[in-house]
């Protein structure tokens, strides 16, 4: 009898505690186990393993874990602005949580097995499955200001649809005025989705927008965030006033996008963010203290950056350090990256696109699997070297065959040495595609003139120009000084294990 009464006594004590004000935050005394999609996370307060979640966040697909209620209380002051329930009740200009599915009058039906929709994460059954366009997959297609307000045009990288977002002054009341309002609008999916189908709400995804509270929201990020996007509010664009700092531990972060937001510091290392594989940076500000050393980095995009740490040889230690650490890099894409010299070395590297690298004069590459090289709008490339040997060569499989290499040199000015390097490459051929570019791109190319004389564009490397002069001496030690040739020691993962992580 005593055993049967104990649960009632405990519940009564809990109700009395709540009446005395013991619960001071949303979902404070409601702890729920993580969904079946996850095996828990890390405590947002202490960083230890945790399997309890803030219910206020759970209702809005925001995952914040705690190991104890005491740690939830201690962390409430920091977590409160980013709590999913608070964000819904009083929207913050800097926090965008994944919205729940629209309410349905029919009771939610989960079926006999209690399954949830693999696409919207809501119970399968009544009501439509609606997935908003993922912020981390949208592609900027331009903007314009009209009588109705500021219009931004996007293409959804998940569904392929193009849509327009209209916002008033200061970025308020943003709404989709044309194009598909949802990335997906249809029936629920009870079965697992194909890995290629990105029309879904991704758990552990956070989107922050610029504003006066941005730094506070960055500091309050849950430790288990996997996908993070920080971008300018609709209608604002890049604002040089104010500067945020990203320098904190996010051990599960895999994809990071920093778009049109001024940063004073971006600090990403193996100790703080060891699992980042995809990094996109656009308009960070030239005064940004840039320190990125990520061994697992696979994709890098840098648009509009003139690093302040350029040395006398035109090198940026910050950029060089990032490339030296990313030995498994597969794709590098840049637009208006103002550096004078770049060195790439990696057996996995397949694409290097340096569109409008106006100041680039020196380029060295070891990439036995390179398939695409973009040099469009590179106005003064004096030296291009494809290295014949490297310490990474021993890691290639026996009988490795160099793939075909497509090279885009539209509106570029190449020296005689750079042309010979392209002609001597065993598989290089002219690319059949090019960037659209601005009308001024060709004008600037003619102004620089290159080796073809003033007023001409010297980008044709297909035929021998008759200049057989010897190449300048190449200092291998200087290359090694900026390119770390040691094997990756801090991950301990071989290529097969990394491929399995990608498939997961």
Image (cartoon, rainbow, N blue to C red):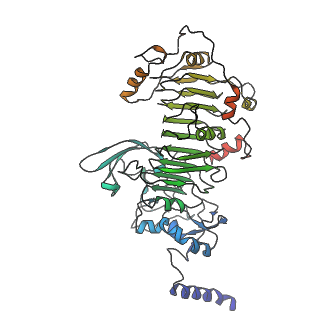
User: Height in image: 12 above or below 477?
Assistant: below
Give the number of callouts: 0
Would residue 1 be visible to someone looking at this image?
no
Closest to the observer: 212 or 14?
212
Q: Residue 122: percent from the left, percent from the top?
A: 49, 61
Q: Residue furthest left?
A: 147
Closest to the observer: 253 or 185?
253
Q: Residue furthest top?
A: 466
Question: Which residue is found at the position 74% from the left and 44% from the top?
Answer: 489
User: Height in image: 285 above or below 342?
Assistant: below
Question: Which residue is found at the position 57% from the left and 40% from the top?
Answer: 299
User: Height in image: 497 above or below 191?
Assistant: above
Residue 93 in the figure: left or right of residue 371: left
Q: Residue 293: percent from the left, percent from the top?
A: 63, 45
Question: Which residue is found at the position 52% from the left and 67% from the top?
Answer: 79
Q: Residue 187: percent from the left, percent from the top?
A: 44, 54
Would residue 407 be visible to someone looking at this image?
yes
Q: Which image quarter holds the N terminus?
A: bottom right
Residue 292 in the figure: left or right of residue 414: right
């Amino acid at each position: 009898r005593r055993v049967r009464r104990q649960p009632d006594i405990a519940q009564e004590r809990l109700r009395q505690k709540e009446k005395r004000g013991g619960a001071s935050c949303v979902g404070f005394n409601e702890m729920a186990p993580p969904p079946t999609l996850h095996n828990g996370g890390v405590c947002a307060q202490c960083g230890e393993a945790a399997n309890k979640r803030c219910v206020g966040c759970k209702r809005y697909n925001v995952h914040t874990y705690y190991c104890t209620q005491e740690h939830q209380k201690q962390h409430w002051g920091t977590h409160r602005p980013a709590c999913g329930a608070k964000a819904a009740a009083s929207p913050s200009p800097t926090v965008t949580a994944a919205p729940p599915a629209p309410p349905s009058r029919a009771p939610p039906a989960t079926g006999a097995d209690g399954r949830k929709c693999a696409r919207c994460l809501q119970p399968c059954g009544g009501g439509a499955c609606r997935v908003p366009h993922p912020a981390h997959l949208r592609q900027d297609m331009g903007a314009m200001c009209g009588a109705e307000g500021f219009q931004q045009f996007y293409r959804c990288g998940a569904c392929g649809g193009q849509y327009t977002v209209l916002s008033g002054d200061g970025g308020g009341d943003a709404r989709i005025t044309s194009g598909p309002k949802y990335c997906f609008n249809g029936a629920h999916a009870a079965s697992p989705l194909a890995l290629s189908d990105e029309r879904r709400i991704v758990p552990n995804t956070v989107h922050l927008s610029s504003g006066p509270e941005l730094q506070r929201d960055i500091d309050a990020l849950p430790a288990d965030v996997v996908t993070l996007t920080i971008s300018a509010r609709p209608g604002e664009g890049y604002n040089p006033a104010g500067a945020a700092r990203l320098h904190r531990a996010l051990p599960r972060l895999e994809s990071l996008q920093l778009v049109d937001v001024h940063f004073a510091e971006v600090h990403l290392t193996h100790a703080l963010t060891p699992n980042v594989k995809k990094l996109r940076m656009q308009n960070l500000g030239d005064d940004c203290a840039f320190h990125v050393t990520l061994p697992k980095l696979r994709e890098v995009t840098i648009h509009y950056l003139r690093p302040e740490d350029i040395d006398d040889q035109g090198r940026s230690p910050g950029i060089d350090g990032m490339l030296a650490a990313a030995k498994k890099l597969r794709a590098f894409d840049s637009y208006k990256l103002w550096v004078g010299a770049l060195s790439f070395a990696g057996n996995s590297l397949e694409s290097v696109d340096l569109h409008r690298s106006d100041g680039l004069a020196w380029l060295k590459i070891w990439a036995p699997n390179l398939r695409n090289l973009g040099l469009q709008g590179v106005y003064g490339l004096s030296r291009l070297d494809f290295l014949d040997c490297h310490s990474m060569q021993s890691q290639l499989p026996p009988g490795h065959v160099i793939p075909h290499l497509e090279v885009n040199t539209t509106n570029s000015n190449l020296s005689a040495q750079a042309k010979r390097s392209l002609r001597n490459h065993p598989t290089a051929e002219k690319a059949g595609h090019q960037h659209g570019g601005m009308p001024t791109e060709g004008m600037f190319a003619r102004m620089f003139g290159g080796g073809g004389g003033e007023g001409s564009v010297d980008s044709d490397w297909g035929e021998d120009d008759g200049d057989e002069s010897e190449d300048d001496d190449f200092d291998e030690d200087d290359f090694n000084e900026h390119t770390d040739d040691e094997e990756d020691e801090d991950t301990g993962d071989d290529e097969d294990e990394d491929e399995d992580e990608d498939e997961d």
